[in-house]
Each structure stands twice: as structure tokens, then as C-alpha cells.
Image (cartoon, grey):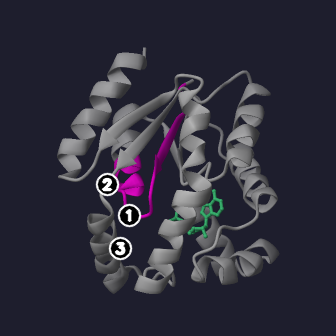
Amino acid sequence: MFNIVIFGAPGSGKGTQSDLIESKYHLKHISTGELLRSEIERDSEEGRIANNLISKGNLVPDDLIIGLLKKKIESSPSRTGYIFDGFPRTVAQAEALDKMLSERGEKVNVLLDLEVNEKILIERLLNRGKTSGRSDDNLDTIKKRLQIYHEVTMPVMDYYKKTDRYREVCNNTTVAGCFEHVVEILDSIHR
Ligand code: AMP
């Protein structure tokens, strides 16, 4: 089993790189943003709580997202491992993920941090907003999401650095260029 956390600010390309990793390494891609959007679509209780928070650019509560992720892993077993995209976004979530995986005799093998400069992030998200239909791809919400990323999510990096599972990837250029670097890193640790 090989489990990856794909990490980075909103607009850093986590979804795109996750899809590429999924098809090359046959790992299961789980995006917590997608999980939440499908709960909103189903109009479930979790979806109703999440809807308001997401459209304002806030995070949903840890226990809600940890519960949803647990259910998702149980309902979609993988024999190879997972790519966690958009999770963990807080240190409490990082601890919960380690606990969840260690109960299964597994762990997060590596965190890939997609580093992109802020000007490019904002451009990409505004551009995505033209077609994504997402309530949170507008300038005010983007700024709020970036602020939360800096204040609440970035400490997750240190959590993984301490246990030597952190790797930085630059994603200021092309999708292919970034993926090449991702492959280099994964091939050096994925045996
Ligand atoms: P994403 O699709 O990853 O950009 O996520 C969209 C939104 O869903 C985020 O801005 C948060 O409001 C919410 N969200 C997704 N994943 C998490 C998480 N792990 N913890 C809290 N909120 C989350």
C-alpha cells in the first residue's frame, strides 16, 4: 500500500496532478472538496452544513470531514493505496488521518506540496470560476481561502516535515513539467 497526500493552496493543481498520479500508479483519488460537493448535491445533513461554509471560503468542521472521509474509505477499498486531495487541511485532520491509517496497518508515505506563487493562483482560480460553476471561485472568496490556507493549513506541512514525509514540487509552469517532477519523487520512494 502506498498513500499520498497531495497538498497546496487552492488553485495549485492538486486535482489535475492527482488524476495523473491515479492513472500512472493505480491509486484511488479521494478529493474531500468533491466529497462535500456531492453531499451538497444530495442535500444531506452534512451537505447543508457544508454549503454555507464553502461558499464563504471557510473550512468545514474537522469532525464532519473526518467522518465523511472514513465512510468513503470504507465504501471504496483500494488494494494499492490512496491519493488524499484537499485533506488534511488542519493539524487535527493530519493526526486523524495517521490514526485512521495506522488502525489498518498503513500510513501516509509522502506529502507532495505543490508550490505556486500567489499571483498565478489567483489568475488560475478566477479563470476556473468562468466555467466551474463553483460558488467559491470568485475574488472575495478566493482571498479568504488563501488566508485560511496560510493561517490554518500551512502548519500541516511542519507536521509532515517532522516525520520526513514532506516533498516540495514547483507548479508554476506546466502540468507536464510538474508531473515529471512528481514522478521523479514517487519513483524514488515507491517500491
Ligand atoms: P477544494 O475542492 O479542495 O478546493 O475544497 C473546496 C472547499 O471545501 C474548501 O474551500 C473547504 O471549504 C471545503 N473543504 C474541502 N476539504 C476540506 C477539509 N479537508 N477540511 C475542511 N474543509 C474542506
Distance from disc 3 to disc 2, alpha carbons, whole Å, reads 12 Å
State if disc 1 and disc 2 touch (CB < 8 Å): yes
Q: Which residues are magenta?
A: 2-19
Q: Tell me whether circle 3 and circle 2 mark residues in contact (CB < 8 Å).
A: no
> Would residue 138 be seen by someone viewing this image from the given angle?
no
Give percent across and percent down for residue 90. 66, 51
Q: Residue at x 31, y 54 (%)?
A: 116
Give the farthest residue toward the top: 191
> Which amino acid type corresponds to the residue marked 1 in the rendered image?
Gly
- The residue carrying mark 1 is 11
Decide which of tag 3 and tag 2 comes sooner along the chain: 2
Quadrant assignment, res 84: top right
34 with respect to 124 (left or right): right
Q: Mark 3 sits on what residue?
A: 125
Nearer to us of marks 3 and 2 is 2
Task: Give the alpha-carbon distance from disc 2 to disc 1, as whole Å.
Answer: 8 Å
Q: Is residue 9 magenta?
A: yes
Q: Which mark is residue 116?
A: 2
* Relative vertical location of residue 62 with respect to residue 20 in this rendering, above or below: below
Residue 61 at x, y percent in the picture: 76, 64
- Mark 1–mark 3 CB contact (< 8 Å): yes
Separation of marks 1 and 3 at Cα, in angstroms: 6 Å
Q: Residue at x 18, y 52 (%)?
A: 173
Q: Quadrant of the C terminus?
A: top left
Tag 3: amino acid? Leu
